[in-house]
Amino acid sequence: MACLLFYRAAVISLLGIGAGGVHSLFHPVTLKPKEPEPLPAVSHTDTPAPTAPALGLDITVAQAKTLFDADAPFLDARNTAEFEAGHVARAFHMPPDAFFGSKAPPALDLLDREKPVVAYCLGGDCHASHDVVIRLQSMGFKRCHVMVDGFPGWQKAGYEVETGPDQMGGPQ
Amino acid sequence: MLLLRLVLGGLFIFAASMKLYDLQAFNDSVRAFELVPDNADHAIVLLTFIVPWIELLCGTLLLLGLWTRSAALVLSFLLICFIGGVFSVLARGMHVTCGCFGKFEVPCTGPIGTCHIVRNTVLLAVSVVVLWKGPGSLALDREPR
């Protein structure tokens, strides 16, 4: 009786492993976000414009601030309570589950896929901002960055913050 | 017994469906647990696909009352692994979401915490009862009562 129990359990497990293995061959998943494409240099004269150092995927709070000052949109990947308690000024609330089922959150319609976008969460081991960037890149966003120190780093630097719900209504 | 079997089976079919509906989201959760080294990408991908298929298979077997005890045994093992994963996350002080039921994390919302341990322990207890008592009525398994 016990032998039959374990034998059947092994068969079930092997069937599950087999089905999962075959499925994985046909359905790619992305493990890591890609580095952003560099911004094209713009020159209004015959002299080639000097190119600014390209920002990588992971950026510091100071680097994020330069993008903030250039009106780059910020996406907050934390949960609703954390967002409403305080977030980067003008940030959109866009946690990973806003993309559940490969949906595009409504706020993405307002964003330019060619321009820099900054995602952040809690800093430290929080993966949510990287997960949001993976989704954004799958939807054609070319220049995504992650503020690695997250909202705590931004707040500690004394930069602009707001409280309250997302003016766009948050993830749908 | 019938009710326990149906509830457990239905719950795992639902959980599997949510994972299969958005495998990228479940993959994000698997990576976030950091139980597998970063350079073991193939292991992370396999886990992403294998867990929901095993859940789906076991859930279906429980609903049918077929190979009931073995399906409950496999689910019990899975749940012990899930509980271990939760303890590991809490011990390392990590801020991680479960991804167990897609975006429908009921009753435990928010990041991994004590609620997830309690929920998974209750499910483990139910699974062990099904393993011990068998399929009950309306089952394809033919076991002496």
Image (tube, coloured by chain):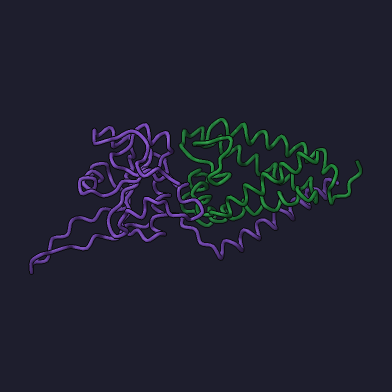
Residue A35 sits in quarter = bottom left
* Place of residue B108 in the rendered image (x, y in percent of width and height, measured from the top left): 56, 35
Query: B84 or A33: which is nearer to us?
Result: A33
* Place of residue A76 in the rendered image (x, y in percent of width and height, measured from the top left): 36, 43
* Place of residue A163 in the rendered image (x, y in percent of width and height, measured from the top left): 33, 33
In the image, taking residue A77 as reference, residue B106 lies left or right, namely: right
Query: A113 or B62: which is nearer to us?
Result: A113
In the image, taking residue A79 as reference, residue A42 lies left or right, namely: left
Chain whose colour in the figure is green: B
Residue B50 sits in quarter = bottom right
Q: Residue furthest right?
A: B144
Chain A display color: purple
* Place of residue A171 in the rendered image (x, y in percent of width and height, measured from the top left): 43, 45
**Residue at screen point 84% across, 42% down:** B136
Query: Is residue A51 positioned above or below B87 on the image?
Result: below
Badge count? 0
Query: A21 or B145: which is nearer to us?
Result: B145
**Residue at screen point 42% across, 51% down:** A105
In the image, taking residue A142 as reference, residue B87 lies left or right, namely: right
**Residue at screen point 26% across, 41% down:** A61
